[in-house]
Amino acid sequence: MESAQDIWLKALGELQTQVSRSNYNTWLRSTHGVSHEGSLFTVGTPSAFVAEWLTRRLCSLVKKTLTHVVGEETDVEFVVRDQARPQRRPQLASALADGGATVRSIPDTLNPRQTFDSFVVGGCNRLAFATALEVGENPANTFNPLYIYSDTGQGKTHLLHSIGNAARLGGRAVLYTTAERFTDEFVLAVKQKRVESFHSKFKTLAVLLFDDIQFLANKRQTQQCFYHIFDELHQAGCQVAITGDRHPREIQALNDKLRSRIESGMVAAIQPPDYEARLSFLESRAAESDVVIPADSLRLLAEEVRGNMRQLEGAIVYLTAQAKLTGGDICSQTVHTLLTGVNAKGDGKTIISAVSDAFDVSIEDLLGKKRDRKTALARHAAMYIMRARTNHSLAEIGRELGNRNHATILHGCNKFRLEMSSNPKIERAVARINAQLSREPDL
């Protein structure tokens, strides 16, 4: 009898011709056959996220393929069991041997939903997507370093996470961090006199993903530290991918050596989306929703919402929530109500009030310095919703939320997005807040 792995390898050969290359590399390449008992075939995956995604998205195709390979009706289940990981990541053993930080000591902050398959490609981002895809599939082979820049909300962070998810499924040690988090950890390391320990946690990496490098401007010591880490990793064959809000030469107070090192690789821009790109993005997100959004509504949104992709995504979230809560169909009036809210200014106080009620946290605490988990979560929710629903800049949101700086707002939004992606309860709370806000008369 053939082993489960032999059967699965044959199935993978067929599946490779039936799904996109990025789909295969992201979700199937790292799987293996675990067992074949009766009519049930068990497939091992490296994480619960992969198992869940395969169960929801590719289960029927995999069952059909296995039935063809085995020659009889075969069911499939996906379990978390990555037997091949020790062989694919020998650097763990060496890290333990020399006392360095292991990959397991590095916090996992990759968003499993942000993959190449969920990224909508258009003329505005085609070059950035193509180079990121090449980096994800073949790290340190072609574009190293890779630098992607754009205005806020155009997808550069999504591409970083896509690179990380693809590389990690290929068995590589990956670390994603923001410039703000890197700075905070470095400052703490200096205070505690453990800079060498901080530096050592990067030594085992195969891929370093560094988001929003512009926040290192005017931080000379932190830039110097990052430059040395960057230089050592690059020379050791580690892939480095960085994002910023503008071209490196336009970031004032950036170390000349660091700027030169960044510009020695591939620099790719993401342009603001045109109408076709906005419509394509909306159609893609609408297809993932479990409610029907009419084509004319999507065209109207694409025409009127000309901000960033995050605003467009917020529009889909709102329409979906509205349809579920009211039980009615989406119509032109629903879209016009949404457009009024998207284009509204001065609704920050309304959002703060709604978040305060939903999370049972006082407005005084939201705007104050209290930092317990409940208050911090509510504050991050307010940051996230204000950024999605208004045209306010990060600085304006910061002023509304107790005179916080723009870096704090960006960090809070990113942290809440990750929290929401892994917690359906929080996601539902945001949907209810959005629906409530859209019924407010001043919106």
Image (cartoon, grey):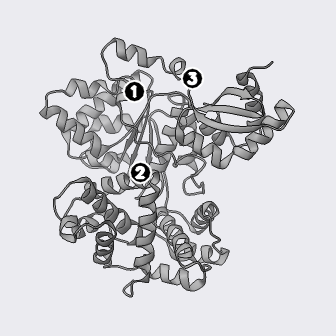
Measured in 3D between alpha carbons, the distance from the residue under mark 3 to the one under mark 2, in whole angstroms, is 28 Å
In the figure, is residue 129 to the left or right of 13? left
The numbered mark, 1 or 3, whose residue comes first in the sequence reads 3
Measured in 3D between alpha carbons, the distance from the residue under mark 1 to the one under mark 3, in whole angstroms, is 17 Å
Report the residue at 65% width, 35% height from top: 28
Q: Quadrant of residue 62?
A: top right
> Callout 1: few (<14), some (14-19), or many (20+) C-alpha neighbours within 10 Å?
many
Q: Residue furthest bottom?
A: 441
Report the residue at 34% width, 69% height from top: 358
Report the residue at 18% width, 37% height from top: 188
Q: Position of residue 64 (x, y in %)?
A: 80, 41
Q: Quadrant of residue 100?
A: top left
**Disc number for residue 311:** none
The numbered mark, 2 or 1, whose residue comes first in the sequence reads 1
Instruction: Using the rendered image of the protein, determine whether residue 432 is visible from the camera's viewpoint.
Output: yes
**Disc number for residue 103:** 1
Residue beneath label 2, please? 418
Instruction: Using the rendered image of the protein, determine whether residue 343 is visible from the camera's viewpoint.
Output: no
Point out the image quarter for the N terminus. top right
> Amino acid under label 2?
Leu
Seen in the picture, residue 49 relative to 81 is either above or below; the reply is: below
Residue beneath label 3, please? 83
> Amino acid under label 1?
Val
Mark 1 secondary-structure assignment: helix
> Callout 2: few (<14), some (14-19), or many (20+) C-alpha neighbours within 10 Å?
some
Q: Quadrant of residue 105?
A: top left
> Amino acid under label 3?
Gln
State the residue in front, 328 or 318: 328
State the residue in front, 309 or 140: 309
